[in-house]
Amino acid sequence: MKTALAGVRVVELGTYVAAPALGNMLGVLGAEVVKVEPPEGDPTRKTTPWSWANYNWNKKSVALDLKSPAGARAIRRLLSKADIFVESLSPRAVRELGLGFDRVKRLNPRIIYCSIKGFAGDSRSSDRVGFDTIAQAEGGLMHVAGTGGRPSRVGNPCVDLSAAAFGAIGILSSLLARPRRATLVEIPLVDVVVYWNGYWLPYIDANGREPTNLGTSHPGFSPYSVFETSDGFVFIGVLTDAIWKKLAEKLGLGSVPEYSNAQARISARAEVNRLVQEAVRARTTASLLALLGEDVPCARVSSLMDIHGNPELRARGVVREVTVDGRHASVALPPFIRTLAPKAALGGPRELGADNGVLVSRRLGKTKRPMPRRNP
């Protein structure tokens, strides 16, 4: 079975996570992804090699000095033959290099141009540099994730990865458009976080204030928190009165009639949490999950080491290995790969400039298979 994007060429120009993750997703779906790096290489090759390994396999590598006349000519040739351009440069760099959408679409009137920036092009902050943590702060995620009145960063590049997924949606929808014309797909990182926090905006309309008791808690449910077991932590989330009744029965809390109503449990959140904590403290995490799992929403609080060594994740192909500089590196794959591209090859990241000889020349050609067409 041919992959969905076989015959599609992507030029990726960006570092760290957002653009590389988007290029990686498109590559998994069968696109030829040409990663353009500066002569010294993507900084993540050295500064965060784990990030480099995770988002840059199955790509071709071209090293170009885009500020030189030869490099400028080479990137223009690449873009003139590409179907998709993914970039996450700073706004200033895009201007100085002459690689804005209006310039690129004159080179290629069918290009799909995906731009990932910290801030929207029509916002007052459009010229500011922005990345994942900046978006977490300005989009309200640090406030939501914090506890005790102190904001907190989510400890993975969740905004970058979500921006990559939204970028893929925009690109794939543009590929299906007829007639095909140059299209700008703009993904501002701050807007991604605002979209997430859209969950809370009607709450503010209804209550005249922002929600409290966030972190691991939720203003609409109780108990809804992390509890300590004899050998770790579990999250328990009671969404209905019926689930509370099940929890109380299984933990031996008795009927506790005063807490049979959700609003009563929310009003007495601290006492409800205390009751549950006392009931689970002496139990192991595994025994608690076995006791509650089919009737009460609950989850082990896993560490990163737990995920890394989880045999089921590796058996299902969610975590696999690639070779980077002669060493094995564990990488997590996009969730759709198991059904849309189960046989996707996992070649390790390429050496810097490994494909210059083939791709940076006046003989640069198009991939053999034409663009996929939708049936009339």
Image (spheres, helix red, strand yellow):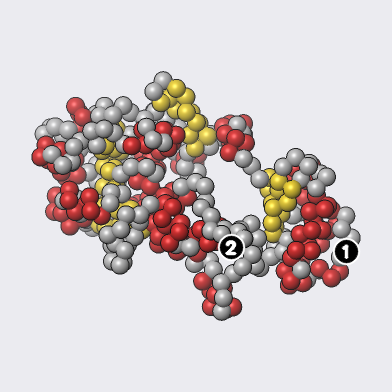
SS for callout 1: loop
Percent across and percent down for residue 20 are 36, 42
Judge whether 308 appears above or below 154 on screen. above
Residue shown at 43% from the left, 62% from the top: 138
Label total for image:
2
| Depth check, front residue: 264 or 296 | 264
Furthest residue in direction top, as rendered: 326
Percent across and percent down for residue 365 are 17, 35
| Depth check, front residue: 81 or 57 | 57
Q: Is residue 253 left or right of residue 74?
A: right
Residue at mark 1 to residue at mark 2: CA–CA distance: 35 Å
Residue pointed to by mark 1: 255
Amino acid type at circle 1 is Ser
Look at the image and tell me in which quarter the C terminus lies. bottom left
Residue shown at 22% from the left, 50% from the top: 93
Q: Is residue 219 visible?
A: yes
Which disc, if any, is residue 149? 2
SS for callout 2: loop
Percent across and percent down for residue 326 are 41, 20
Residue shown at 76% from the left, 68% from the top: 268
Res. 31 image quadrant = top left
Q: Earlier in the sequence, mark 1 or mark 2?
A: 2
Q: Is residue 246 left or right of residue 160?
A: right
